[in-house]
Image (spheres, grey):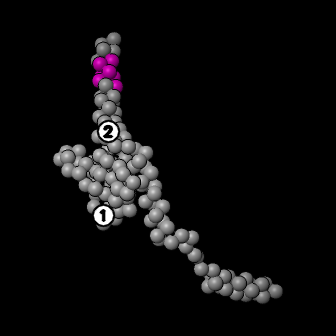
Amino acid sequence: MFMKFLSLALAGWLISMFTLVPASAQSQTETDARQTEKVKARILKLGTGKKVLVEVRLKDNRMLKGYVSEAAEDHFNVADAKTGAVITVVYAQVQQLKVNKYPHQLGIGLAAIGGIIGIALILAVALRGS
């Protein structure tokens, strides 16, 4: 009885393995179109200016760093913060977009940590003689 049940279960499992084929819910073009719209919405939401730094990885694996100097309906411009060179990027070319809204956070954090360590050292020296 157990062998009969086991053979039926194995046969059912084998049939389901070969008949169930995972289907892609969306085609590549739909995925690319959705990605393009997300990038476009994010760029338009961020706006333009030197305060918002971006890192853009293009589909040809080039990396652009700078700020968004202009945002239009079909493209945006990335200006290099150091050289000022402007590169026009079509939204569909973008593979990945990283945004650093607050580029001076690291400096502020290090200054705060340094201040805390300085106060701790002053307290340690002052209280050592007590």
- Residue appearing at x 20%, y 50% in the figure: 85
Instruction: Name the outermost residue toward the top.
Output: 130
Residue 80 showing in the rendered view:
yes
In the rendered view, tell whether residue 102 sits above or below residue 14.
above
Residue 51 image label: 2
Disc nearer the start of the sequence (2/1): 2
Circle 2 residues within 10 Å: few <14, some 14–19, many ≥20: some
> How far across and how far down the image is residue 68, in percent?
31, 47
> How far across and how far down the image is residue 4, in percent?
78, 88
Residues 36 and 56: in front is 36
The type of residue carrying mark 2 is: Lys
- Residue appearing at x 31%, y 57% in the figure: 89
The type of residue carrying mark 1 is: Asn
Residue 86 as seen in the image, left or right of residue 40: left
**Residue 48, image quadrant:** top left
Q: Is residue 20 magenta?
A: no
Mark 2 or mark 1, whichever is nearer to me: 2
Per the rendered image, the range of residues in magenta is 116-123
Q: Secondary structure at mark 2?
A: loop
Q: What distance separates the C-alpha of mark 2 from that of mark 1?
A: 25 Å
> How far across and how far down the image is residue 24, in percent?
55, 73
Q: Is residue 121 magenta?
A: yes
Q: Secondary structure at mark 1?
A: loop
The C terminus appears in which quarter of the rendering? top left
Residues 27 and 104: in front is 27
Residue 61 image label: 1
- Residue appearing at x 29%, y 34% in the figure: 107
Residue 109 as seen in the image, left or right of residue 7: left
**Residue 118, image quadrant:** top left
The N terminus appears in which quarter of the rendering? bottom right
Residues 13 and 83: in front is 83
